[in-house]
Image (tube, rainbow, N blue to C red):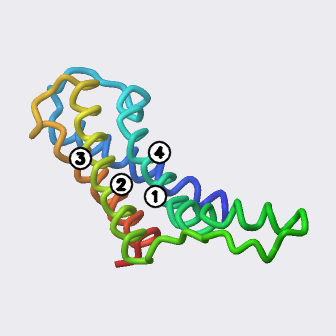
């Protein structure tokens, strides 16, 4: 199951590339391996958005927990925890921003008009939407 779960986004990206080639048969040859680099900002942004929850809830407790480890638990150091709405907003902004960075990077790599790469960008939007549901959950 894990192999299937890990292979599914790659298969969707390959399908988007095939659709792009099918709708535009006279497009300049652009290898799938080259266009796959366009997904990197989205992948990195999804990773960052996933770990924002941990970073904004648990990281504010590092100093009090460290001090408590050495026996000073009654010092009363402040604990900084972000509100869940703030975390969800930052996750959403991260996914939206990195989606558009992926579109721009794909355009730079392929050097084609935007409409010729529309199936590729719609595939990115589908993957980004799935990541939105998993990470942000709105």
**Residue 25, quarter of picture:** top left
Q: Is 27 displayed left or right of 32 in the figure?
A: left
> Badges 3 and 4: C-beta atoms under 8 Å apart?
no
Query: Label 2 belongs to which residue?
Result: 94
Q: Regarding mark 3 in the picture, which secondary structure is present there?
A: helix
Query: Label 3 belongs to which residue?
Result: 121
Q: Residues within 10 Å of mark 2 (few under 14, many from 20)?
A: many
Q: Nearer the viewer, mark 3 or mark 4?
A: 4
Label 4 vs 1, first from the N-terminus: 4
Rendered view: 128 above or below 57: above
Q: Residues within 10 Å of mark 3 (few under 14, many from 20)?
A: many
Q: Residues within 10 Å of mark 4 (few under 14, many from 20)?
A: some
Label 4 vs 2, first from the N-terminus: 4
> What is the C-alpha distance between the residues marked 1 and 3?
20 Å
Q: Regarding mark 4 in the picture, which secondary structure is present there?
A: helix
* Image disc number at residue 49: 1
Q: Regarding mark 2 in the picture, which secondary structure is present there?
A: helix
Q: Nearer the viewer, mark 1 or mark 3?
A: 1
Residue 71 in percent (x, y) is at 90, 69
Label 3 vs 4, first from the N-terminus: 4
At x 75% / y 72%, what residue is drawn? 75
Extreme residue in the right direction: 71
At x 23% / y 35%, what residue is drawn? 104
């Amino acid at each position: 199951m894990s192999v299937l779960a890990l292979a599914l986004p790659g298969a969707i990206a390959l399908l988007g590339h095939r659709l792009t080639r099918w709708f535009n048969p006279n497009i300049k040859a652009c290898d799938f391996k080259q266009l796959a680099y366009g997904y990197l900002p989205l992948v990195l942004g999804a990773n960052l958005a996933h770990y924002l929850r941990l970073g904004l809830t648990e990281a504010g407790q590092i100093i009090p927990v460290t001090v408590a480890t050495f026996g000073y638990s009654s010092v009363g150091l402040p604990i900084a925890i972000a509100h869940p709405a703030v975390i969800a907003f930052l996750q959403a902004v991260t996914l939206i921003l990195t989606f558009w960075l992926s579109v721009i990077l794909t355009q730079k790599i392929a050097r084609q008009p935007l409409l010729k790469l529309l199936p590729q960008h719609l595939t990115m939007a589908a993957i980004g939407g799935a990541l939105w549901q998993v990470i942000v959950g709105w």
